[in-house]
Amino acid sequence: MRRLALCVLWPAFLTAGVLDALVFAVLDPHDLRWFGGAPVGWTPLAVYSVTFLIFWAGIAAAAAMTALLSFSDAEVNAFAPEPSGPGVPPAGVT
């Protein structure tokens, strides 16, 4: 599971960095405005950082969904907890 997380997060990190560079090659953080027209008022470093984290989260979510959809049904069910409760026999009892 740890390897899968690294296989999702590391490429997402690199892609978010490239996307951030491409976006801010075109946009100036000082020119950003809220929906009502008021200036954002953040420092450029804050704009770069928040934007990078948003890009990273979105790309990682897409990559995680792709990884999840690549699992077989047996691999997905291996993560499920054992059923317990009234009417369910304990594990190993037939």
Image: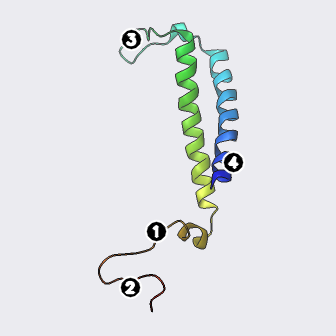
Q: Residues within 10 Å of mark 4 (few under 14, many from 20)?
A: some
Q: Splitting the image into 4 quarters, where does residue 38 fall?
A: top left
Q: Quadrant of the C terminus?
A: bottom left
What's the residue type where badge 4 is placed? Cys
User: Which residue appears at 61% of the width and 53% of the height?
Assistant: 66
Per the image, the residue denoted by label 3 is 37
Q: Secondary structure at mark 2?
A: loop
Q: Position of residue 18 (x, y in %)?
A: 70, 28
Which residue is under mark 2? 89
Residue 93 lies, in percent from the top left, at 45, 89
Q: Quadrant of the N terminus?
A: bottom right
Q: Nearer the viewer, mark 1 or mark 3?
A: 1
Q: CA distance from mark 2 to mark 3?
A: 63 Å
Q: Nearer the viewer, residue 33 or 88?
A: 88
Relative image position of residue 92 (x, y in whole percent): 48, 86
- The numbered mark, 4 or 2, whose residue comes first in the sequence reads 4
Vertical order, 60 against 4 (above or below): above
Considering depth in this image, is 89 or 64 the residue closer to the camera? 89
Element class at badge 3: loop
Dot placed on the residue nearer the N-terminal end, 1 or 2? 1
Q: Which label sits in the foreground, 4 or 1?
A: 1
| Vertical arrangement, residue 72 with respect to residue 65, above or below | below
Contact between labelled residues 3 and 1, with CB atoms less than 8 Å apart: no
Amino acid marked by disc 3: Gly
Which comes before the other along the chain, label 4 or label 1?
4
Residue, x 68% and y 40% (percent of image)?
Answer: 10
Q: Reading the chain from its start, which is encountered first: label 2 or label 3? A: 3
Number of the label disc, if any, that sits on residue 81: 1
Task: Specify the amino acid type for callout 1.
Answer: Pro
Mark 3 touching mark 4, by CB under 8 A? Answer: no
